[in-house]
Image (cartoon, helix red, strand yellow):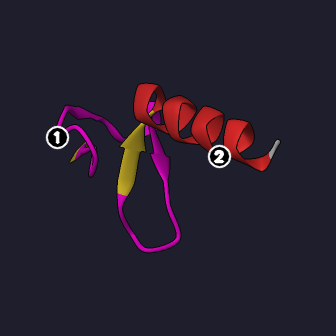
Amino acid sequence: MKRRCKKCGMIRAEKDLVHLKDETYLCFACWNKEKYEQKSTAN
């Protein structure tokens, strides 16, 4: 099944997306970017 990334709007297969707790999805590119930003602000 195809889903849309909530950040960039890209439509991908569900297996290529990160499923978030609030029933939304992020593509791996946005998820990695978000993860990196959180890591850099924590330092």
**Disc 2 element:** helix
| CA distance separating discs 1 and 2 | 21 Å
Residue 3, position as x, y percentages in the image: 24, 46
Which quarter of the picture shows residue 8? top left
Looking at the image, which residue sits at the far right? 43
Is residue 18 shown to the viewer in this render? yes
Looking at the image, which residue sits at the far top? 29
For the C terminus, which image quadrant?
Answer: top right
Q: Which mark is residue 28?
A: none
Q: Which mark is residue 9?
A: 1
**Disc 1 element:** loop
Q: Identify the residue position indicated by label 2 in the image.
A: 38
Closer to us: 41 or 11: 41
Residue 2 on the magenta segment: no
Closer to us: 20 or 1: 20
Residue 6 on the magenta segment: yes
Residue 39, position as x, y percentages in the image: 73, 40
Q: Using the image, determine if residue 42 lies above or below residue 32.
A: below
For the N terminus, which image quadrant?
Answer: top left
Mark 2: give few (<14), some (14-19) or many (20+) Cα within 10 Å.
few
Three-letter code, disc 1:
Gly
Q: Residue at x 17, y 40 (%)?
A: 9
Q: Using the image, determine if residue 30 lies above or below residue 29.
A: below
Closer to us: 11 or 39: 39
Residue 32, position as x, y percentages in the image: 56, 30
Which region is colored magenta? 4-24
Q: Residue at x 39, y 70 (%)?
A: 23
